[in-house]
Image: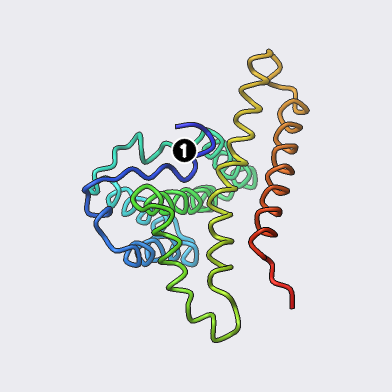
Amino acid sequence: MNAHTSVLGIFEPGDGWLFRARVGTKYLLLLALAVPPIFIFQWWATAAGVVLVLAALLTAGLGLRKIFGFGWYIWFFLALLAAYQLVGLRWEPAFVTPGNMLLGVLAARMLTLTTSTADLLDALTRGLGVLRYVRINPDAVALMVALMLRSIPFLAGSIEDARAAARARGKERNLALLLTPAVVNAVSFAQRTGEALHARGLPEEH
């Protein structure tokens, strides 16, 4: 798995219970596991959420390597968050803040590893159908989610690719070599996305 797909993972058909579960059920499970710890903000709630998500993924037949197969940059970012809290001697936030982020990533992978992107977006569009009553196009919302699902791993992968190229040249610590290609790729990605949206008639003119 390359860096461009590692954050959310790649769907591969399986026969575990999560693969067979309805998409709506998986969305509700994600919310039930990932949202409460954010509001409770206690170490035990975060730990319980992570344990339950891991239990769901493992009992669905996904191995630890598949579950934790996201890039090193996620761990690096989580470590930075924990270190920032520890500097201020905030012990519980040092666990809860990165822990809740890890929980969110794992819960998202619970969806993306066991459900095709098309099925995820179809279910989301149906679920957001009520937005039509407040004059919001659910198709447009689903499209924004699709762009998010595509852009996050792409941008993360751009950073990883730039890091690999800099390392190959023996200049891994040169920030310019790390950031410049990533920024160029991000701008190019945004331009291509804008052109694709324009070709589809979005955003709609009123």
**In this rendering, position of residue 30 left or right of residue 94:** left
| Residue 5 pos. (x, y %) | 49, 39
Q: Which residue is mark 1?
A: 70
What's the residue at 29%, 45% (across, down)? 13
**In this rendering, position of residue 204 left or right of residue 30:** right
Q: Splitting the image into 4 quarters, where does residue 188 fall?
A: top right
What's the residue at 24%, 48% (across, down)? 60
Q: Splitting the image into 4 quarters, where does residue 122 fall?
A: bottom left
Q: Quadrant of the C terminus?
A: bottom right
Seen from the viewer's position, the closer of residues 47 and 165 is 165
How crowded pointer 1 is (Cα within 10 Å; few <14, some 14-19, many 20+) is rated as many
Query: Is 15 situated above or below 42?
Result: above
| Residue 61 pos. (x, y %) | 24, 43
Mark 1 falls on what kind of element? Answer: loop
Seen from the viewer's position, the closer of residues 46 and 75 is 75
Q: At label 1, which amino acid type do we have?
A: Phe
Count of labels in the image = 1
| Residue 59 pos. (x, y %) | 22, 48
Query: Is 117 situated above or below 132?
Result: above
**In this rendering, position of residue 39 left or right of residue 85:** left
Query: Is 203 situated above or below 15?
Result: below
Rendered image coloring scheme: rainbow
What's the residue at 38%, 64% (across, down)? 27
Q: Quadrant of the N terminus?
A: top left
| Residue 167 pos. (x, y %) | 64, 18
